[in-house]
Amino acid sequence: MTLGVANLDTAYNYRGFTSHRTLASTASDLLNEFTISTKVGFFPSSRGPERCLDPARLRQAVHQSGQDLGTQPDMVLLHNPERTLAGLTPEQGRDRWSAACTALDDLTAAGWCRSWGVACWDPRPVLTVLDRALPAPALVMVRAGLMDASEKLATWFGLGRHARWGMSPYGGQARHPVWNKVDARQFLETGQDCSPIPAAFRVAYELPQVKRVAVSTSSGEHLAELVAVAALDTDDNRIDRYRSLLSAKALTIQAS
């Protein structure tokens, strides 16, 4: 917290389904100082983690999460539901989506978490099963870079920037050479001291537009650098032009 970080994001299946117990055992006296978000939707099996939207399993995971953490999470996110929905017919998908949303909404009402949301690596399969009659999430977490589909999902639920979080700002490969070749500093206001890789983190707040960006690191120095760069000013005109180019490209792909 000395760096200004007050939010922890984890998941039921992280660290081989031990992340909650690990947090509780190493920082139990500090957890109440943080806002904690976690995710449910992957479960242990003999073949490794398996995805599932079954309401009973989701309820069990949320209950277990609170017990393992020693406190109720502030936010529970439905973890990559598109991984299940993409393999179903539209009717099956709507039924699974309906049951999962209802289960998380009921868990929130019962006090097992303060609110619930959806974490999507690829929101497009989710967009095909939405229904106004169903409970709506309080937040969406989306992958950096997938702009149009992510913003369509948030807009459909009426969620402004304050209720949109980002994740995976480097596509899961922060050491990939591309981050040194593509200089994201061009999207920042001039005169600000920053290297290319942290600049890409700052730009992730704009593509799509989100309030927070989740990032993992084992280096306090790296974390401090990211906290500092998050306060830098972007060149909004250049960002807007780039957003327009991305939207036009997406329309071209859809039409082809």
Image (cartoon, grey):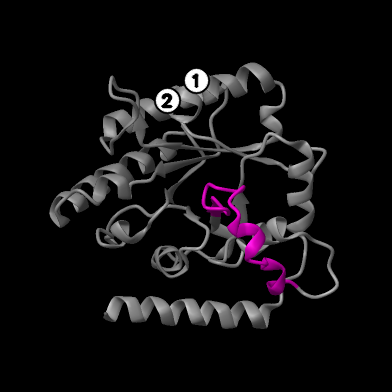
Q: Relative to residue 54, is residue 64 depicted above or below? A: above
- 235 is within the stretch colored magenta: no
> With 117 as the anchor, is 219 left or right in this view?
right
**At which x and y percent is residue 204?**
60, 61
Q: Is residue 35 above or below residue 21?
A: below
Which class describes the residues within 10 Å of circle 1: few (<14), some (14-19), or many (20+)? some
Q: Secondary structure at mark 1?
A: helix
Quadrant into which the C terminus falls: bottom left
Dot 1 and dot 2 residues touching (CB under 8 Å): yes
Residue displayed at 28% across by 39% down? 53
Kind of element beneath mark 2: helix
> Looking at numbered disc 1 in the image, what kind of residue is underneath it?
Gln
Tell me the tag on residue 63.
Answer: 2
Percent x, y of residue 70: 57, 21
Q: Which residue does the image show at 30% across and 22% down from the upper left?
A: 45
Residue for badge 1: 67
Q: Residue at x 73, y 51 (%)?
A: 226
Query: How far across and down, in percent of the image, does residue 165 sit?
Result: 55, 54
Bounds of the magenta segment: 166-188
Closest to the observer, 134 or 205: 205
In this rendering, is residue 98 above or below 46? below
Q: Nearer the viewer, residue 234 or 255?
A: 255
Residue 230: x %, y % from top left: 73, 58
Going by the numbered disc 2, the residue's amino acid type is: His
Task: Name the image quarter holding the N terminus.
Answer: top right
Tell me the number on the disc at residue 88. Answer: none
In the image, 231: left or right of 249? right
Residue 186 drawn in magenta = yes
